[in-house]
Amino acid sequence: MLKNIAKKTLAAALLASVGFAAVAQERVYVIDQRDVVAKSGFDLCWRTGYWTPAAAAADKAGCECDKDLIPADVCAGKAAPAAAPAAAAPKPAGEKITIAADALFDFDKAVLRPEGQAKLDELASKAGQLNLEVILAVGHTDRLGGAAYNQKLSEKRAAAVKEYLVAKGIEANRVYTEGKGKSQPVTGDTCKGNKKTKALIDCLQPDRRVDIELIGTNK
């Protein structure tokens, strides 16, 4: 119980330090300074450590973000929150970059290769052109291997990206990392078999990736 409370406290402190609001029992999604939910490149809302289906139902963005998980009567008649007027805040800027994990790391490794460092140098340069709010880095793996192992590998790869970007001058509290393991493949059912043959490993390459999003405003 104490460990879970510590994790939630740390998550709340991280989000608050980059100008995002996430109040226990009120907001269970990452909210920017315009009170707008931060979303991934797949238009999925970013959840905080406070998220549960019950808490989502109580959050004012719950029906916008997780309508399928919330009782229909809760969302009945609720409209999506209106976007803030354009004049109320600087126009947000963002960019999503998907980098093949094999371009950043050797197969089954989480140590950045020189080629991977060059790609992150380009990313750091783009971040410097924004009034940066946050960088979201999400690691993914292919389906080979166990779920627990792949989860750890995806987390280590996202952490390696963060560590490098921080070394390039980006504030640590601006980089939010997450590992999705093998839970979000993009290859679908196109790659057949389970043996680690070269053909299968090559086919599954698109699943081994790091999705990186820059969120901020133009200077």
Image: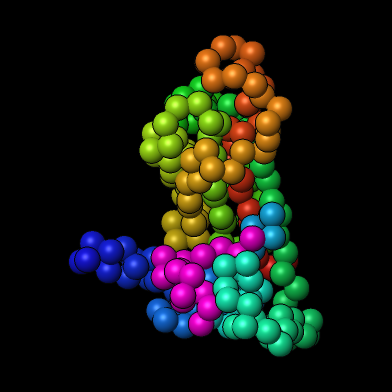
* Depth check, front residue: 117 or 7: 7
Which span is picked out in magenta? 44-58
Q: Nearer the viewer, residue 60 or 41?
A: 60
Could you say where residue 15 lies in the image, as x and y percent from the top left?
46, 69
Judge whether 127 appears above or below 200 on screen.
below
Residue 129, can we see it? no
Residue 93: in sight, yes or no? yes
Does residue 74 lie above or below 167 as drawn? below
Residue at 68 percent across and 84 percent down: it is 76
Residue 130 occupies which quadrant of the picture?
A: bottom right
Which residue is drawn at the image coordinates 53% and 71% (left, top)?
A: 29
Residue sitting farthest toward the right = 86
158 or 180: nearer the viewer: 180
- Asked if residue 9 is positioned above or below residue 124 in the image, the reply reads below
- Magenta segment main secondary structure: loop
Residue appearing at x 59%, y 43% in the figure: 184
Query: Was residue 56 drawn as part of the magenta stretch in this picture?
Result: yes
Which residue sits at x=63%, y=71%?
67
x and y percent of residue 87 in the render?
Answer: 78, 85
